[in-house]
Image: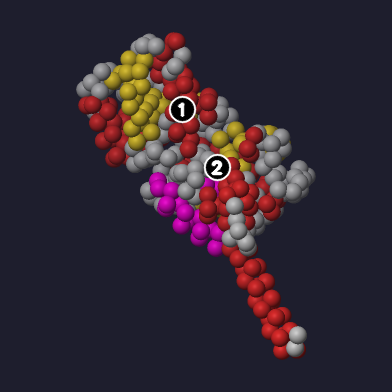
Amino acid sequence: MSAYSRTRRRATLTATAAACALAVTLAGCSGTTKNDAKSEAKEATSGAKADPNAPLKKGLKIAFLPKQINNPYFTILDGSGIDTVKELGSTGKEVGSSDAKASSQVSYINTLVQQRQDAILIAANDPNSVCGSLKQALAQDIKVVTYDSDTAPECRDAFINQAGSEEIGRSQIQNIAKQLGHKGEIAVLSATQNATNQNTWIEFMKDELKKPEYKEMKLVKVAYGDDDDQKSFQETQGLLKAYPNLKGIISPTTVGIAAASRYVSGSSYKGKVVINGLGTPNQMRAYVKDGTVEQFALWDPKKLGRLGAYVAAALVSGRITGAEGEKFTAGDLGEYTIGKDGEIILGPPTVFDKNNIDDFDF
């Protein structure tokens, strides 16, 4: 081989190696199988070990991406999380769209990755649509925490569940059944059709209804208000007109239950149709006091936001990796143990009624 040929060969090999390195950075060099894609995002941290005694890093950049901004529930939750981030010596912010579409969240994730955030906390509007962008974040060692609504486990480091999904779903049926004497038609007014948490709860509701004690109850419809106040209001109206024998509506979303309560409170259905579900005390206080709603439930979103901040900081600092069995302390919230698939449960929900609603302000 001539010197010229050897030089050309070295140049070609160098160019090929550079191209492959770039391809690895972007999507992985050589053929990528489906299983490779699933594990790729976690590869960098799969061998990492937690150091419970590691100091919490300061000066971190932590972003909250809710299902939608200007939603009272997420305003409270994210505000508490941002305040906690500041307490920990770092910088927090909330970003997001006013609609509850997964496609809208993708563009924000991409921007946060470009900004080199240290951690992204996201309440996913779809379990899979945001995964591609989140995997890009993980590949760049940005910690990803889902809260309120999860993604597929391989797309994040940890999931903060506001309460056990089964407990939430079954309790929704149990609560409304007591009010209805275990008789009558009911409907569900959910958020978006792809909301992970809503769909999980609804599956547990359906399973609970299979028990003998609910044989005289029937779920006639699951409607979707898209976490939009006006659409939820209209869906409530539609349910009551389409099902004249409807006795109760469960709305496991703060936007939906408030809109449903507003419609019923000003209609002839007040006192005849039970509204139950998940809402905040400040949203629901007027409807409880005027007799439209007897009870509803929710966890404390301030605590959920606070826990989110601690989890994100602990991940970035190496105190936890998201592995099952790891323990950590979240300040005044106490100690938590990470469960299967990186799930962390805040705690049981609180039931609000006229006797305790004024004890809460959120």
Q: Earlier in the sequence, mark 1 or mark 2?
A: 2
Q: Is residue 186 above or below residue 282?
A: above
Residue 156 in view, yes or no: no
Residue located 68% across and 52% down the image: 43
Q: Say which element carries label 1.
A: helix
C-alpha separation, residue under disc 1 versus residue under disc 2: 17 Å
Residue located 43% across and 48% down the image: 102
The x, y position of residue 273, in whole percent, is: 30, 20
Q: Is residue 146 left or right of residue 354?
A: right
User: Residue tagged by mark 2?
Assistant: 152
Q: Say which element carries label 2.
A: loop
Residue located 60% across and 33% down the image: 345
User: Residue tagged by mark 1?
Assistant: 203
Number of numbered discs present?
2
The x, y position of residue 335, in whole percent, is: 69, 34
Q: Is residue 114 left or right of residue 235?
A: right
Q: Is residue 54 left or right of residue 130?
A: right
Image: magenta residue range: 100-123
Disc 2 residue type? Ala
Q: Quadrant of residue 58?
A: bottom right
Q: Quadrant of residue 80?
A: top right
Residue located 62% across and 56% down the image: 139
Q: Is residue 341 magenta?
A: no
Residue 196 in view, yes or no: yes
Q: Considering depth in this image, is 253 or 75 the residue closer to the camera?
A: 253
